[in-house]
Amino acid sequence: MSARAPISLLKLALLTVLLVCSAIGAMTGAAAAVDETAILAKKPPAKLSAFGFFADASRQVPAEGVIPFAPRTPLFTDFAEKRRFVYVPEGESAVYDAHEAFAFPVGSALIKTFAYEAADRPGGLRLVETRVLLRQEKGWQAWAYVWNEDQSEAELKIAGAKIPMTVPIPGGGTQDIVYAVPNKAQCKGCHALDGEVVPIGPKARNLNHVFPYRQGEENQLAHWAEAGMLTGLPDLADVPAVPDWLDETAPLDKRARAWLDINCAHCHRAEGPASNSGLFLTWDEKEPAALGIGKRPVAAGRGAGHLKVDIEPGDPDASILVYRVESNEPGVMMPELGRSLTDSRAVALLREWVASME
């Protein structure tokens, strides 16, 4: 054997490894890049897989360049678990904002999958729908994709969908519901700000906490900045932060305000669809009357439950806000979209918050 033979064998071994890796990538989708032409297309693709957001969609493993994230306090949707991801085109970045959702560049995408625990499904989850927000030249576009039974693909549902299913309830037990996938108009109903569709979750106060990345735990905002996905981030000590609403060691007022901010304030704010109510529930709101304290409703219809004020300090039973969050009756319940069940934990928190007021 010549002296050059070992080098040839080494090359052969390396080639074999590369071929194996390539085969694995082809099977899992790990080698596929996000298709920015699908993000920017006027007509959305019929199937979620066309975007290339996932290396393994059934297990919600993101593709390269797609980053998982989570708000500290999430929006409630009939006890669904959610897997959230963000994609920003290479070489581009979102711009930090201390109060509103970050300004994302054209070609960005926000992906959110709604799922329930299911031991017999891939990844231990039954995937129900994946919603995408796509940043195009003329603004954001929102679309919903519904997963098939074998969890291999999700299909576009412009008109929404109704899915009968049984869901687990925290603390034990199950509940039969008709899960509602929003139609195109309903997406805009929650995501409207000054008449434009905008994201809700990716705000500084929601992301200013540690996330368990594959490489280890790290503050999400710092992670985004280090990855070049976010510019303008100040010192983390100067960034607002909401608590986990279920963390009983956090101040009661902040927990209640965090829940209202993520669940209600996208509509109940001066620039939102419920601006005519005069009830403004954003995290930054300081005016007691705007928060509903001692405030009479603009319209005293069935939704008011014959009660006189939005929040009666010290008396949750006399407070319209508590009454509507506690209800699951259409036309009364708040939020009016995205749920058919009542989260008793949220009701207990808001009742305790109102009862603590003097």
Image: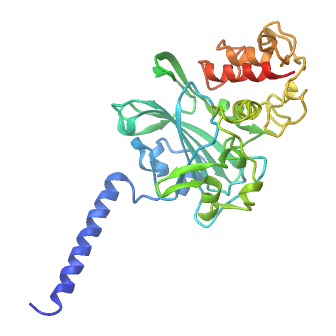
Q: Quadrant of the C terminus?
A: top right
Seen at 30% across and 63% down, the residue is 21
- How far across and down, in percent of the image, does residue 140 sit? 68, 46
Residue 87 can be seen, yes or no: yes
Residue 169 relative to residue 239: left or right: left
Instruction: Count the labels in the image.
Output: 0
- Taking depth in this image into account, of 210 and 183 the one nearest to the observer is 210
Residue 92 relative to residue 148: left or right: right
- Taking depth in this image into account, of 268 and 47 the one nearest to the observer is 268
Q: Residue furthest top?
A: 306
Q: Quadrant of the N terminus?
A: bottom left
Q: Is residue 342 above or below residue 100?
A: above
Residue 264 relative to residue 84: left or right: right
- How far across and down, in percent of the image, does residue 270 sit? 86, 35
Q: Is residue 302 above or below residue 46?
A: above
- How far across and down, in percent of the image, does residue 60 sit? 44, 44
Q: Residue furthest front?
A: 249
Seen at 40% across and 32% down, the residue is 148
The coloring applied to the image is: rainbow
Q: Residue furthest left?
A: 1
Occupied quadrant, residue 334? top right
- How far across and down, in percent of the image, does residue 89 sit? 59, 61
- Taking depth in this image into account, of 141 and 251 the one nearest to the observer is 251
Q: Is residue 194 above or below residue 279?
A: below
Residue 343 can be seen, yes or no: no
Seen at 67% across and 49% down, the residue is 208
- Taking depth in this image into account, of 263 and 42 the one nearest to the observer is 263
